[in-house]
Structure formats: structure tokens, C-alpha cells
Amino acid sequence: MNDPNWRLRDVPRLTVTSPDFADGEPLPQWARAKAAGGEDRTPALEWGDAPEGTRSFAVTAYDPDAPTQSGWWHWRLVNIPATVTSLAQGAGAPGSGLLPDGAVALTSESGVLGYEGSAPPPGHGPHRYFFIVHALDVERLDLDPDAKAGPFGFQLFLHTIARGQIVGTSETPA
């Protein structure tokens, strides 16, 4: 169970990269939570290879290693137009002006609107942060910004036609 997508149906793969970190490598310090010495700033993301029929994208950042039975959602973004293939560094900050027209940020697991940076509990070991881009077969997911993770995930499950990811790591020493 190394991949939080193991229970999802197989779909074609998107290519997802970031100029800010390499897959499997540590996230930049500024991508950590402010309370953990960071800036709550999202890394830039770029993606490609979307299949025909893609009508929008959703982006999530998820920590399956959080000490809960359900992991921790750090970022949920929906209704990204199908013509968009990247997000700028810092796009996860509310009011940044860096989100594409029509994109809607949902709250993180803590109820923060926008991106909530990494902050594993001290001494808990390295955590993985899956930045996942979902190609969807609908232009919009009509979700309230406070939509809970379950209904949100169900909508992604119903409408995802391709998915790709890049994984960053973060650790807080004891």
C-alpha cells in the first residue's frame, strides 16, 4: 500500500513534474506549513498527456502517512480548465491571483482554504506528499469549498479519466 491510489480504478497516466522538486525528493522548506518554519507555498506543477475527452482538471496534495486512518488532505483544487497544463509556484494561496479563471479552491483537512503546507509530527519519520493531477470528463465539479473529503473523493472517482502524480517528502526531527 505505498500508493494512496491503490483502491482506485486504473486510468491512463498523466505526466506530472515540478521545477521545484524531483519525484521522491524533499519538498522545499517554503512548501512546509508556516507553523513548521515554511511559507505554506505550493510548488509549481506541470502536466501533460491528457487524453481526448478531458474537460477539466483537479489537483490534490495528500499525505497518506499522517497519523490518522484516512491520511491528510493538504490541498484540493477543482474546475481547472482543460486548456491549462501548469500551475505557478504559490498558486495555492487564496487571493494570489495565480489560479486559472474558473478554478475553485476547497478547504484542506484543517479547514484552511487553499494549500496547507507539510508539517509531520516531530519524530514521526518521513511523510510522502502526493501531488496528483486528475483529468476529468466534466467541466465542473459542483462542490462547496467546505466539501468533505469523502464526497469530494467520490466525485473524483466518478469523473477521473487519467491521473498522474509527483511525490515530495518532508520530515520534522524529534
Image (spheres, rainbow, N blue to C red):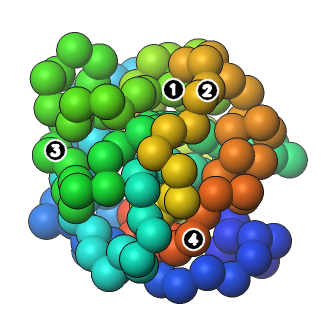
The residue that disc 1 covers is 106
Q: Are marks 1 and 2 in contact (CB under 8 Å)?
A: yes
Tell me the quarter of the picture where residue 160 sits. Answer: bottom right
Q: Secondary structure at mark 3?
A: loop
Sequence-wise, the earlier of marks 1 and 2 is 1
Sequence-wise, the earlier of marks 2 and 3 is 3
Q: Secondary structure at mark 4?
A: strand
Q: Are marks 4 and 3 in contact (CB under 8 Å)?
A: no
The residue that disc 4 covers is 161
Mark 4 vs mark 2, CA separation in Å: 19 Å
Mark 4 vs mark 3, CA separation in Å: 26 Å
The amino acid type of the residue labelled 4 equals: Ile
Say few, some or many: other residues with alpha carbon within 10 Å of mark 2 (under 14 / 14 to 19 / 20 or more). some
Q: Is residue 42 left or right of residue 129?
A: left
Q: Quadrant of the N terminus?
A: bottom right
- Closer mark to the observer between disc 1 and disc 3: 1
Which residue is pictured at 23% across the width and 56% down the height?
A: 83
Sequence-wise, the earlier of marks 1 and 4 is 1
Which residue is pictured at 55% across the width and 19% down the height?
A: 145
The residue that disc 3 covers is 89
Tell me the quarter of the picture where residue 52 sits. Answer: bottom left
Mark 2 vs mark 3, CA separation in Å: 24 Å
Residue projecting furthest to the front: 53
Q: Is residue 7 left or right of residue 97?
A: right
The amino acid type of the residue labelled 2 equals: Leu
Say few, some or many: other residues with alpha carbon within 10 Å of mark 1 (under 14 / 14 to 19 / 20 or more). many
Sequence-wise, the earlier of marks 4 and 3 is 3
Q: Is residue 5 left or right of residue 87?
A: right
Mark 1 vs mark 2, CA separation in Å: 8 Å
Sequence-wise, the earlier of marks 1 and 3 is 3
